[in-house]
Amino acid sequence: MSLFVSLLFGAVGGVYLAYARRVHEADFLVCGVVLMIYPYFFSSVVLIVIVGLIIAVIPIARRRGWL
């Protein structure tokens, strides 16, 4: 289960990187790299999901003016 969740957030990070290259947004670039790397540091599936959701929402929230 941990591997699947790690791959899922890694894929989201890859999409963020591709989007960052297209629109030149640093928020998506940084969050994309972090999303691909952070699962190596957590072993709990719950922690991976919680941290991944928080990181994935950051650039969207900044773009909409929530942060």
Image (spheres, rainbow, N blue to C red):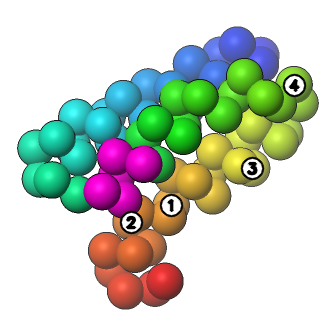
Q: Earlier in the sequence, mark 1 or mark 4?
A: 4
**Residue shown at the point (84%, 39%) measured from the top left:** 46
Give the residue number, with chain letter if any, for mark 1: 57
Q: Contact (CB < 8 A) between labels 3 and 1?
A: no
Q: Eyeballing the image, is 40 above or below 32? A: above
> Residues under labels 3 and 1: Cα distance?
11 Å
Does label 4 or label 2 sit earlier along the sequence?
4
Q: Are marks 2 and 1 in contact (CB under 8 Å)?
A: yes
Q: Which residue is mark 4?
A: 43
What residue is drawn where x is 36% and y is 29%? 14
* Circles 2 and 3: CB atoms closer than 8 Å: no
Q: Which mark is in front, 4 or 3?
A: 4
Magenta part of the protein: which range? 26-30
- Reading the image, the residue beneath label 3 is 50
Amino acid type, label 2: Ile
Specify the amino acid type for callout 1.
Val
Which residue is disc 2 drawn over? Answer: 60
Q: Residue at x 50, y 61 (%)?
A: 57
